């Protein structure tokens, strides 16, 4: 569940959901009765992925990426009553290179940004008329925040070697619609971001180091910065207006808080819900109501109403759009070797003995991502084929605060892999999975982890998809294509000169099991040539290796035919080499 939002009339709740292959907007009545019908699901067209969602009256407005058509980004409107496509917003589809981001939608118009040729255009698109350009900035934008009345905006964008926050007038009353609010140096870039704009000023997450989230208020007239509060070891994740005042949600150390910046007070809201399982997300849905969504094993919605911030009301269990009647998922909390708690999920077919099935460890990408009790499509397909599929939120995964994320820095080839092995050992002891051989499957960072685990000698076989095989080459690729992220990636892999972070190419001589490795020909993130050389190194040593390079595909497969053909080859490979237990065929 991503960014749940209440409809303007308060009668419907909508949210965005997606995995690697599916995008959908789910709509259900609000508040929902216990026996309410399943949500109405609005699905995108083949190859279309939704990235932003907002209400516009009774319609759902989404920003979509049409990956079947050259990564075109467009704004689309769907009828929430029957899910029927209503119209494209023409301005956004003017150029296949345009990167459109939906900022806000109302009953009659959408405010969005579009990037092209190094410029950022903020435009207002009326649903019954042409688009109106509000401002043009000669730089790439990172974020745009708009005040409640849609009268002014602040755009965070790249300028030279640093960043600049520009104030925009959206009313057309002034001769100069843009003005510089403040400039940031490179040392301020890591955790500084505008959050919410109101008449009291601009509230922002301010950079004070890796393990502290400082809330600051910037005077929109003078540009002066006033620190409101510091929260060591915490992260500010959401911002919104509740009862007309700015609020921000913060998580860390196993609890979530609702921050009231105008009083510099933090009130604990949901510690009883989060326990030690990580934080919840807090979203604003209307003036007097905030919606909280639970992580991992905690499912459902909770509400916090203005005037009663200490009382949390459970609204409903929300069935997931992609829930399957053919598979079941068991959630377990396991303990790493050093005592750190980890969430693990075992998905298998709902018929037959689970402990006798061959097992697949499915490692998520990122590593700054997370799994939850809703299995992705890959897990459902493999479980339906007769495997028990294990997913683990190892250190570096999101959802447990910054300390948990930062624990993976410098440990990609160490603690992260140890966490995965510890989880498998404990799940075997609890008889949630069998004692036989295990295959490891992963995409991107998950593929890296698969190859590194192969070098430890125990997997029966591994499948690595669109993964880096040389970390130094990965950083060099980012430096050439996404320089703003290269320094952060390098710091995560090598936080200090003494850090030893091994790459699959460093341990290729230790691999003994069969390997299936695949890449997209047009992958802009991963140096494909390095992967081809890695596969040749295995073949030269007599290791069985299957190399697939998908024509006209990127980091993820988008063509339905390519996805199906690859899924068939992967399943055949796993059935051939994962011989423990019986796989249905």
Image (cartoon, rainbow, N blue to C red):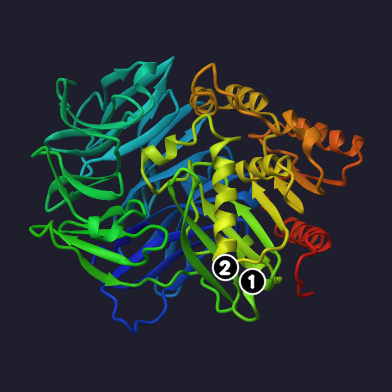
The percent coordinates of residue 144 (x first, y second) are 33, 37
- Taking 193 as reference, is 529 left or right? right
Please tell me which residue is depicted at 91% across the width and 35% down the height of the picture: 540
x, y percentage for residue 258? 20, 48
> Where does the image place residue 465, in percent across and percent down from the top left?
70, 46
Q: Is residue 150 above or below residue 191?
A: below
Inter-mark Cα distance, 1 to 2: 6 Å
The N terminus is located in which quarter? bottom left
Between 578 and 171, the one lying in front of the other is 578
Task: Name the one closer to the observer, 9 or 497.
Answer: 497
Reading the image, the residue beneath label 2 is 432
Looking at the rendered image, the quarter that the C terminus falls into is: bottom right
Q: Which residue is mark 1?
A: 355
- Label 1–label 2 contact, CB within 8 A: yes
Residue 434 image offset from top left, x and y in percent: 65, 66
Is residue 280 in sight in this rendering? yes
Estimate how packed mark 1 is, as few (under 14), some (14 to 19) or many (20 or more) residues with alpha carbons within 10 Å. Answer: some
Q: Residue at x 31, y 81 (%)?
A: 34
Residue 278 as seen in the image, left or right of residue 47: left
Q: Residues within 10 Å of mark 2 (few under 14, many from 20)?
A: many
Q: Nearer the viewer, residue 303 or 495?
A: 495
Q: Quadrant of residue 547?
A: top right
- Mark number for residue 38? none
Q: Quadrant of residue 285?
A: bottom left
The earlier-in-sequence mark between 1 and 2 is 1
Badge count = 2
Query: Residue shown at 90%/36% (left/top)?
Result: 541
Rendered view: 35 above or below 151? below
């Amino acid at each position: 569940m991503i960014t749940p939002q209440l409809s303007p009339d308060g009668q419907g709740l909508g949210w965005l959901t997606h995995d690697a292959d599916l995008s959908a907007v789910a709509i259900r009545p609000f508040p929902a009765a216990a026996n309410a019908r399943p949500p109405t699901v609005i699905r995108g067209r083949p190859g279309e992925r939704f990235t932003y969602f907002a209400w516009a009256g009774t319609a759902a407005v989404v920003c979509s990426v049409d990956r079947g058509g050259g990564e075109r980004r467009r704004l689309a409107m769907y009828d929430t009553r029957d899910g029927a496509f209503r119209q494209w917003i023409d301005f956004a589809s003017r150029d296949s290179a345009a990167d459109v981001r939906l900022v806000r939608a109302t009953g009659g118009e959408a405010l969005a940004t579009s990037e092209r040729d190094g410029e950022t255009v903020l435009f207002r698109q009326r649903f019954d008329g042409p688009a109106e350009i509000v401002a043009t900035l000669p730089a790439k934008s990172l974020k745009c925040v708009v005040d409640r009345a849609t009268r002014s905006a602040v755009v965070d964008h790249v300028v030279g070697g640093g960043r600049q926050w520009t104030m925009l007038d959206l009313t057309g009353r002034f001769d100069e619609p843009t003005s510089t609010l403040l400039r940031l140096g490179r040392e301020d870039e890591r955790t500084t971001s505008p959050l919410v704009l109101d008449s009291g000023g601009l509230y922002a997450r301010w950079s004070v180091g890796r393990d502290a989230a400082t809330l600051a208020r910037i005077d929109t007239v003078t540009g002066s910065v006033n620190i409101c509060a510091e929260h060591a070891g915490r992260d500010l994740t959401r911002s919104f207006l509740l009862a007309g005042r700015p609020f921000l949600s913060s998580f860390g150390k196993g609890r979530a808080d609702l921050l009231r910046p105008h009083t510099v007070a933090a009130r604990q809201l949901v510690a009883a819900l989060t326990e030690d399982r990580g934080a919840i997300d807090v979203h604003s849905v209307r003036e007097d109501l905030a919606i909280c969504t639970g992580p991992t094993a905690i499912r459902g919605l909770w509400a916090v109403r203005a005037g009663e911030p200490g009382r949390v009301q459970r609204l409903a269990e929300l069935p997931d759009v992609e829930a399957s009647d053919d598979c079941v998922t068991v959630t377990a909390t396991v303990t790493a070797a050093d005592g750190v708690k980890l969430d693990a999920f075992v998905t298998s077919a709902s018929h037959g003995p689970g402990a006798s099935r061959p097992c697949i460890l499915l490692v998520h990408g990122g590593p700054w991502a997370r799994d939850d009790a809703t299995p992705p499509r890959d897990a459902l397909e493999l479980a339906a084929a007769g495997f028990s599929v294990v997913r683990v939120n190892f250190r570096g995964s999101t959802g447990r605060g910054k300390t948990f994320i930062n624990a993976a820095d410098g440990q990609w080839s160490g603690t992260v892999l140890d966490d995965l092995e510890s989880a498998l050992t404990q799940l075997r002891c609890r008889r949630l999975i069998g004692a036989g051989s295990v295959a490891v499957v992963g995409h991107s960072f998950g593929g890296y982890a698969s190859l590194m685990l192969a070098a430890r000698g125990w997997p029966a076989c591994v499948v690595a998809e669109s993964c880096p095989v040389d970390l130094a080459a990965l950083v060099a690729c980012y430096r050439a294509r996404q320089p703003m992220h290269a320094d952060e990636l390098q710091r995560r892999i090598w936080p200090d000169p003494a850090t030893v972070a091994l790459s699959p190419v460093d341990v290729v001589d230790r691999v003994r099991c069969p390997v299936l490795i695949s890449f997209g020909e047009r992958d802009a993130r991963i140096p494909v040539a390095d992967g081809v050389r890695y596969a040749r190194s295995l073949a030269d040593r007599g290791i069985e290796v299957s190399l697939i390079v998908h024509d006209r595909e990127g980091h993820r497969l988008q063509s339905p035919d390519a996805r199906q053909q690859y899924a068939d080859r992967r399943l055949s490979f796993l059935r051939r080499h994962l011989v423990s237990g019986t796989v249905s065929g």
